[in-house]
């Protein structure tokens, strides 16, 4: 089933916005809202592909991951967003709140895109290598998080070009830190996501117990 | 894993997704009106 022409246009615009194309800015608030929500939904679908690959040692775990991974990302974003918006307002930043949300959603899309393109590699190593399977699965998550954070910073910096950036980048830092903090606990809550035990299955307490 | 807490979290997540679908549909309707307005302005 192919996406509708409107959805295809949205996805194409979304890729341009994520890549930072200068002429890709939406021309109205309604258009921007549509792109923001499309970015989030597309990101969730892409992360679901990674979930299928990471849990592919058993059919039940794979299917459970198809909803667990997107849910973990969505809940972490929902948990972090209010603090980011408050930080943006308190730092008297030049960036409007809806622009911060739009940049956040496109960076989630970018990070999930990285997860999705690494998913086949994760799946094949998971089934064929006992040494590299787990590090590759975890490594793909870290690469995706780093990509998303960089994309977020770049998107916000571009949106405030020519104006003071400090407040806006402070809000970005708050949002990224809180997203990661929430992600750690939601991963523990949703575990097992990967068939082998990792320190992240125990959340904050186990990661920082050493 | 705490199943009850996970179920509550999933419920919140699903509610957020449903709200986003509604917001998207409203934005899409508004966008169509904007496009029609632009076309009418060009025609006149």
Image (spheres, helix red, strand yellow):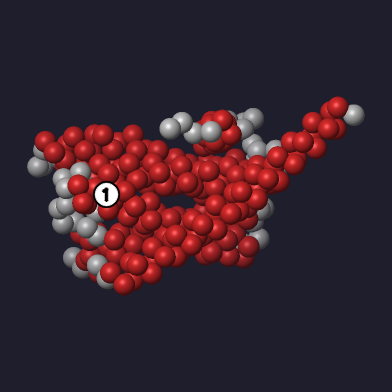
Quadrant of the snapshot with the C terminus of chain A: bottom left
List the single residue furthest toward the left. Answer: A130
Horizontal arrangement in the rendering, residue A127 relative to residue A82 (left or right): left
Q: Nearer the viewer, residue A34 or A15?
A: A34
x then y, percent, for residue A142: 31, 46
Horizontal arrangement in the rendering, residue A198 relative to residue A44 (left or right): left
Quadrant of the snapshot with the N terminus of chain A: top left
User: Which residue lies under the disc numbered 1?
Assistant: A63
List the single residue furthest toward the front. Answer: A1
Q: Residue placed at 61% from the left, 48% from the top?
A: B25
x then y, percent, for residue A202: 23, 65
Chain of the residue under label 1: A
Q: Residue placed at 58% from the left, 34% from the top?
A: A6
Q: Nearer the viewer, residue A194 or B16?
A: B16
Q: Residue placed at 85% from the left, 32% from the top?
A: B41
Q: Nearer the viewer, residue A152 or A78?
A: A78
Q: Quadrant of residue B1?
A: bottom left
């Amino acid at each position: 089933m192919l996406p509708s022409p409107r959805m295809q246009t949205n996805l194409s615009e979304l890729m341009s916005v994520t890549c930072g194309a200068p002429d890709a800015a939406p021309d109205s608030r309604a258009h921007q809202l549509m792109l923001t929500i499309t970015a989030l939904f597309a990101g969730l679908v892409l992360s679901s592909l990674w979930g299928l690959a990471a849990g592919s040692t058993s059919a039940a775990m794979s299917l459970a991951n198809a909803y667990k991974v997107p849910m973990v990302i969505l809940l972490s974003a929902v948990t972090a967003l209010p603090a980011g918006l408050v930080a943006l307002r308190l730092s008297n930043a030049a960036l409007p709140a809806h622009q911060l949300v739009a940049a956040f959603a496109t960076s989630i899309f970018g990070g999930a895109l990285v997860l999705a393109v690494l998913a086949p590699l994760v799946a094949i190593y998971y089934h064929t290598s006992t040494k590299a399977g787990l590090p590759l699965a975890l490594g793909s998550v870290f690469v995706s998080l780093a990509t998303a954070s960089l994309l977020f910073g770049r998107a916000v910096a571009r949106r405030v070009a020519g104006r003071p950036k400090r407040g806006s980048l402070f809000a970005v830092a708050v949002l990224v830190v809180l997203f990661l903090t929430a992600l750690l606990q939601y991963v523990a809550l949703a575990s097992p996501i990967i068939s082998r035990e990792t320190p992240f299955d125990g959340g904050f307490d186990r990661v920082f117990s050493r | 894993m705490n199943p009850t807490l996970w179920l509550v979290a999933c419920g919140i997540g699903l509610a957020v997704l449903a709200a986003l679908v509604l917001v998207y549909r409203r934005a899409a309707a508004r966008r169509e009106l904007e496009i029609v307005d632009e076309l009418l302005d060009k025609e006149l």
